[in-house]
Image (cartoon, rainbow, N blue to C red):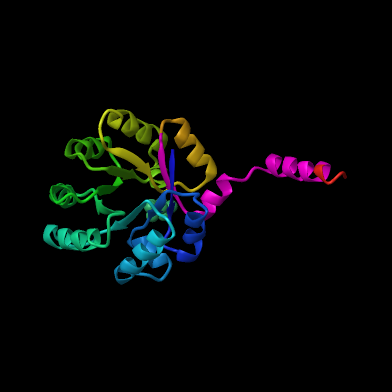
Amino acid sequence: MKLYADSASVAAVVPLLHDGLVRGVTTNPSILARDGLGAADLPRLYDEFSAAGADEIFLQATGDSRAALFDDASRIAGFGHRVVVKVPATPDGFRVAHDLMAHDVRVLLTAVYSLAQATFAASLGVDYIAPYFGRLVDSGEDGLSKVSNMTTVLASTRTRVLVASVRSPNAAATLALNGVSHITADVPVLLAMMVDPVTEQSALEFERVAAGG
Ligand code: G3P
């Protein structure tokens, strides 16, 4: 099991990395915008997350054509060896993913919504796909079966399913129960995953007893 922070907030993510609680960080243009950041901030974010101990830093390329997307992805790949470049799973994105892999760049195809896209991504041999669990459910799909089917189909391939848009501890646990081994979630969700009221109560009792109370 590997957990990642889906956030561009240095203040929120760096403490988790320092404490060794997550393996890395995932971002996209919407996540950057949420923190008032943009593409120009990516080199600094890479350096900060890298220095804090991230194994993998997922940064998304943008571009309104195949050439522009490839150029931006190549720029991002140049930040350092911890980068995994995210590319949207569009027809151009699949082509760019192939071209990047030919240059030994690690690639995640993002916003994967169908099993057909997942199958195609695995045929290319990309490192990761990212289905958006919460958004699948929002659109009326059975998100759990869909993600679970992707996990089954890709199990014998090198492509891993890193599920995003995971909005609660329960969603993360349910995904894990259904075979998902890579999850990215916003920091409040990750922090909430460590907490259970019964555990808190038990911990308080241990302290009281240990103190002779
Ligand atoms: O990384 C996926 C994330 O940006 C989408 O999450 O909760 O807005 O669907 P959400």
Residue 42, quarter of picture: bottom left
Q: State the residue at coordinates (42%, 43%).
A: 183
Q: Quadrant where the C terminus lies?
A: top right
Give the farthest residue toward the right: 213
Q: State the residue at coordinates (23%, 40%).
A: 117
The image position of residue 26, as x and y in percent, is 37, 54
Q: Answer above or below: position of 37 versus 185.
A: below
Instruction: Considering the whole magenta stretch, tell me its main secondary structure.
Output: helix
Residue 85 magenta: no
Residue 71, quarter of picture: bottom left
Residue 183 magenta: yes
The image position of residue 23, as x and y in percent, is 42, 48
Q: In this view, does 50 lie to the left or right of 15?
A: left
Q: Is residue 111 left or right of residue 166?
A: left
Q: Quadrant where the N terminus lies?
A: top left
For the residue pair 203 and 195, the one nearer the viewer reads as 203
Q: Is residue 153 left or right of residue 175?
A: left
Q: How many labels does the image show?
A: 0
Segment tinted magenta in the rendering:
180-209
The image position of residue 87, as x and y in percent, is 24, 53
The image position of residue 194, as x and y in percent, is 58, 45
Q: State the residue at coordinates (52%, 49%).
A: 190
Q: State the residue at coordinates (58%, 49%).
A: 192
